[in-house]
Amino acid sequence: MMELLDYLQDPELVARFQRRCGLFLVEASCRGPERTRSQNGVQLHRENTHGSERRGSWDHQDKNSNHKPTLNGPCANSCSRPQYEVKNWLLHFLFLFSSSLGHEVFYITGLPCIHWNLDPFLCRRLVNMWTLVMYIGQVMKDVLRLPRPSSPPVVKLEPRVDAEYGLPSTHAMAATSIFFTLLLSAPSRVQFQFEIGLLIAVTLSSLVCLSRIYTGMHSVLDVACGFLISAVIILVTYPFWESFDRFQLTNPFSPVVALSLLLFLSYTYPELDHYTTTRGDTTTILGVCAGCSVGYWVSEQLGQTFEPQGLPVPFPTLTAPSVALGVGRFLLGVVALVGTRQIVKTLSLQMLYAWYRVPKTDKNARRRKEIEVPSKFATYTAVGLVNSILVNRFFAFIGLL
């Protein structure tokens, strides 16, 4: 068993998958422009180093250290990360797009789009399961503290998250929970062929899982564990989904429980001896869930939930007018959420900087727990509230519903 686990965690296994998909590591250069050309004329790309300022060694990795080593050549102060060569652009862009399904840009657009254009009930289910799965995955990362695949031999395409630990892959967990929660929840709400839905869920979740190997951010073991953990969570919680829905929408203590519990989980997130983005990302997720939970409760009390009648409803037909309305709702909704995010983020940071007497020019202050947690929680709670209460009412007011 240990031999199998070691094999699945071997970075060379990730590197072989990358090479078979047309992504090759090229020796780093200490000088030269961001893009150079190899001797055969193929354009090479140097990996972006933004968000990673740590120093380490290519030749040595201390497995007992909590700090994760990074790349460093003989010229420590001037070498960039290794360059990479792409030979299959179709797979390259496919996997980059698939990987983006696990980033904030998808969460702030894709999940609300289901609320605006299909059924708020489905969005509520997805947000609840996504939050549960992601919190468990993020905590497991920082408790187990298993490193990501080393480079070389792996090409790493997302250095922003390289300081985080690897197991389990939260991209794999999120993709599995979102697509299969949607698959299990939709039959009672929308008329569709279950076999086609199953094929789509398997395809999309598989693409996200494979993308994490292609981008070099996770080992095969990380991805497999992420998928299995998410599947187990779905199976264990599925019998309680309806009961939780009733509590969330009708219990008078639901808003208090949501806000207090999720804020408590944000502040008690496991501490590390170095900074990573996991605490901030987790607080973001918990804030979204808190805002949406309170917002759905408020909408239920107001008696206007914007859910379809006569369930299950036929799957929406794609006509030119319906597509235009959907695109209009999507664009206006995204503007509302992004605008809310920017306004509340700016105001909350200004207030916290003033409260703690921190210079506004000190960008690193945002990493401090007493600033990062309340700022992100307030920002994304506001985003969740706007999504679940105001956006659909605005659409109804201007005739987009």
Image (cartoon, rainbow, N blue to C red):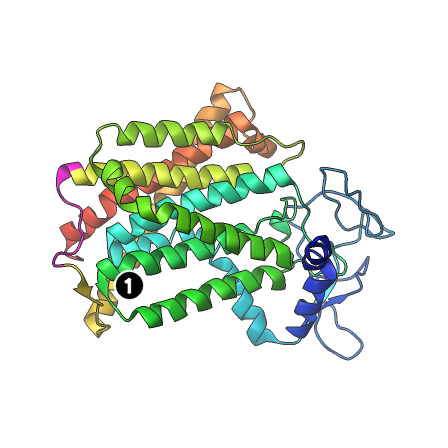
Name the residue rendered at 67%, 50% in the picture: 148
Name the residue rendered at 44%, 47% in the picture: 233
In-image side of 339 versus 142 (left or right): left
Q: Which residues are magenta?
A: 301-310
**Can the viewer see residue 74 in this picture?**
yes
In-image side of 363 versus 4 (left or right): left
View extreme (front): residue: 1
Q: Amino acid at mark 1?
A: Val
Specify few, some or many for label 1: CA neighbours under 10 Å numbering under 14, 14-19, or 20 or more. some
Magenta span: chief secondary structure: loop
| In the depicted structure, whether residue 317 falls above or below residue 112 | below
Query: Residue 11 falls in which quadrant of the image?
Result: bottom right
View extreme (right): residue: 74
In-image side of 34 versus 374 (left or right): right
Q: Position of residue 85 (x, y in %)?
A: 70, 70
Q: Camera-side residue: 201 or 67? A: 201
Q: Position of residue 10 (x, y in %)?
A: 72, 58
Name the residue rendered at 28%, 63% in the picture: 327
Q: Please tell me whether residue 201 belongs to the stretch shown in magenta.
A: no
Dot 1 falls on a residue whose secondary structure is helix
Q: Camera-side residue: 140 or 102? A: 140
**Can the viewer see residue 171 in this picture?**
no
Q: Position of residue 272 (x, y in %)?
A: 63, 32
**What residue does disc 1 label?**
327
Q: Position of residue 4 (x, y in %)?
A: 69, 58
